[in-house]
């Protein structure tokens, strides 16, 4: 029996598991999915937690509900991937899975510890993230009682999951404080490493005008080097300072730590991937989907949907010995 192994049961891992369970002959292939826990978080919903639109229970469901019955679902941390030996070592019971084909869909996560001072003192007090369910919920509790001041949203560096999310957050904040009747007491500032509000020129111009219309100030080319939580300011590498009363941070995004431990990633632990095929640049029987890949595309659930047709077609062709 051949093994088609998938690491990660988020959007990418769940979708490819369902597809391959339908396409592969069950008498010849066993499809296995491994994930560290059974909580599937609807990450776009994190945007709505700080403003009381969603509650934490609204963004989480059990992963096993989305995994087909003919797919083996294993809950365990992954100790190591050994692509040269075609095997994966799990933490649980020291189990080793030998595979014929591997899909890496281990996602991305925030790493505030990568920025000097970001987690020192102010984290959870007047510094929050909204890229985790806990961070977004804690920010929501803070905002309920906040009576105004200078709110700075800072993107530490790119790439980040859902590149437009910081702008969406700021527009929701403008709505939220207007609804509370304290918009005139809140200064909204967007400090971004980009030279404009967004990446592509047409979008950047339109979104920049929208921010200006909403009274949201833009601090561009701001690459934060340090957070001074004692004096409530962020400091860029070129020594510009942006003061804040409330800092909403989008920390450095990185791939899963196991990618780094396994020697399969780049400097941010994203797996080098052939962008046209979604195949690993180094191992022919390894494929990379979703946020785990280093391809020049947004890290967002919608992107996975567009990837899926290409991935399935190429994987099946490769199994059949075709181009």
Image (cartoon, grey):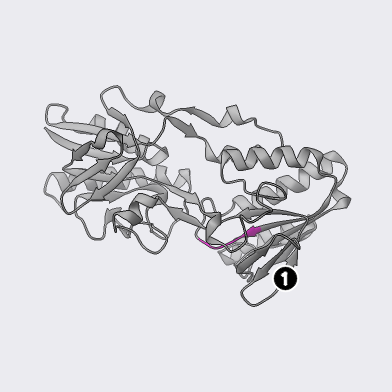
In terms of depth relative to the viewer, which is nearer, 287 or 114? 114
> Residue 29 in the image: x percent, y percent?
16, 32
Is residue 112 toward the left or the right of residue 98 in the image? right
**Point 50% across, 35% down: residue:** 41
Position of the N terminus by quadrant: top left
Q: For this view, does 84 lie left or right of residue 266?
A: left
Answer with the quarter of the image where residue 220 lies: bottom right
Measured from the top left, where is residue 196 in percent x and y? 64, 67
The mark tally for this picture is: 1
Is 155 in the magenta?
A: yes
**Crowding at mark 1 (Cα within 10 Å: few <14, some 14-19, many 20+):** some
Q: Main secondary structure of the magenta part?
A: loop
Compared to 275, does 38 lie above or below? above
- Find out whether residue 164 is within the magenta segment: no
Determine the residue positioned at 63% across, 71% down. 221
Identity of the residue drawn at 17% across and 27% down: 26
Which stretch is magenta? 154-158
Q: Quadrant of residue 144?
A: top right
Could you tell me residue 136's position as x and y percent? 63, 41
Q: Nearer the viewer, residue 18 or 65?
A: 65
Provide the secondary structure element on which disc 1 rests.
strand
Between 311 and 132, the residue placed more toward the observer is 132
Q: x, y (%) of residue 271?
A: 34, 57
Q: Which residue is mark 1?
A: 241
- Rendered image quadrant of residue 58: top right
């Amino acid at each position: 029996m051949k093994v088609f192994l998938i690491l990660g049961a988020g959007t990418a891992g769940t979708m490819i598991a369902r597809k391959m369970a339908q396409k592969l002959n069950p008498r010849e292939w066993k499809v296995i999915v491994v994930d560290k826990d059974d909580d599937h978080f609807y990450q776009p919903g994190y945007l709505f937690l700080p403003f009381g639109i969603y509650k934490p229970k609204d963004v989480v469901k059990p992963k096993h509900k989305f995994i087909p019955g003919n797919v083996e679902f294993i809950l365990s941390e992954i100790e190591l991937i050994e692509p040269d030996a075609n095997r994966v070592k799990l933490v649980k019971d020291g189990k080793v899975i030998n595979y014929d084909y591997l899909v890496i869909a281990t996602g991305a996560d925030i790493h505030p510890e990568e920025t000097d001072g970001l987690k020192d003192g102010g984290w959870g007090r007047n510094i929050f993230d909204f890229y985790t369910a806990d961070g977004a919920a804690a920010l929501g509790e803070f905002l309920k009682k906040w009576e105004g001041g200078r709110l700075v949203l800072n993107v530490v560096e790119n790439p980040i999951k859902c590149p437009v999310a910081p702008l969406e957050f700021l527009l929701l904040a403008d709505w939220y404080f207007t609804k509370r009747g304290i918009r005139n007491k809140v200064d909204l500032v967007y400090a971004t490493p980009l030279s404009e509000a967004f990446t592509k020129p047409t979008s950047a111009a339109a979104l920049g005008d929208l921010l200006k219309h909403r009274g949201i100030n833009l601090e561009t080319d701001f690459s934060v080097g340090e957070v001074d939580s004692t004096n409530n300011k962020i400091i860029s590498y070129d020594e510009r300072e942006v003061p804040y009363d409330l800092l909403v941070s989008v920390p450095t995004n990185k791939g899963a730590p196991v990618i780094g431990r396994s020697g399969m990633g780049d400097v941010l632990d994203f797996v080098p991937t052939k962008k046209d095929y979604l195949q690993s640049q180094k191992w022919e029987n390894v494929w990379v989907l979703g946020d785990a890949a280093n391809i020049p595309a947004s890290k967002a659930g919608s992107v996975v949907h567009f990837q899926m047709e290409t991935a399935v077609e190429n994987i099946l062709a490769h199994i059949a010995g075709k181009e």
